[in-house]
Image (cartoon, rainbow, N blue to C red):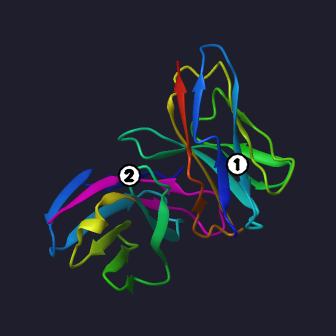
Amino acid sequence: GENVEQHPSTLSVQEGDSAVIKCTYSDSASNYFPWYKQELGKRPQLIIDIRSNVGEKKDQRIAVTLNKTAKHFSLHITETQPEDSAVYFCAAGRTSGSRLTFGEGTQLTVNP
Amino acid sequence: DGGITQSPKYLFRKEGQNVTLSCEQNLNHDAMYWYRQDPGQGLRLIYYSQIVNDFQKGDIAEGYSVSREKKESFPLTVTSAQKNPTAFYLCASSEGGLYGYTFGSGTRLTVV
């Protein structure tokens, strides 16, 4: 089955800096890669996703890049703000399949 | 207002008891999922269902059971066979073809 590894487990940045979270996956057939943000005590929410037919996708301050050859994908947050502080999860799966496999999460702290 | 509802928000279980966690969605999604969240371990899949009257074991199904008698409902029973049930349980749903999940707000189960 799929195995997803996520790094780092904790990340602390100053407000205005950029943050990068990286994930690797094992199943070369995976073609769907979403990212979720979970604020303390709340449900995870989808913030951005990418499919394997593109290498990069951007939405305002958030971008995701995908390297299919190396089987890794990354979340980039620019101009970080304190409200970006949360746990971020990456996930991988097949669009023809039935489930997502999640990474272990990254606790991002943005210091004012 | 469309969404996915989990109840109760907090649940306390005595040793040896079975408890059932409720998950209801009105998004007309075909697929539903149960994940367990422990600190530092990300989201682990317990059971999932892609269609009514059918479900599959996930990675940590032992000690849990589910049913899918209606499209809208996917209850999870935590049985006495689950030796370490204290955790945060998240239900999710998605359209067929593995689009991003919509998560419920979770149930925090504690064994007393």
Q: Position of residue A28 (x, y in %)?
A: 48, 64
The answer for which chain carries disc 2 is A
Residue tagged 1 = B23
Query: Residue B79: within the magenta?
Result: no
Residues rendered magenta in the picture: A89-112
The dot on residue A40 is 2
Q: Residues within 10 Å of mark 2 (few under 14, many from 20)?
A: few
Q: Quadrant of the N terminus of chain B?
A: bottom right
Q: Chain of mark 1?
A: B
Q: Quadrant of residue B20?
A: top right
Horizontal and vertical percent position of residue B25: 73, 59
Please state which of residues A40 and A105 is positioned toward the viewer in this rendering.
A40
The residue lying toward the viewer, choosing from A101 and B42, is B42
Alpha carbon distance from label 1 to label 2: 21 Å
Measured along the vertical axis of the image, is residue B58 above or below residue A56? above
The residue drawn where x is 77% and y is 67% is: B28
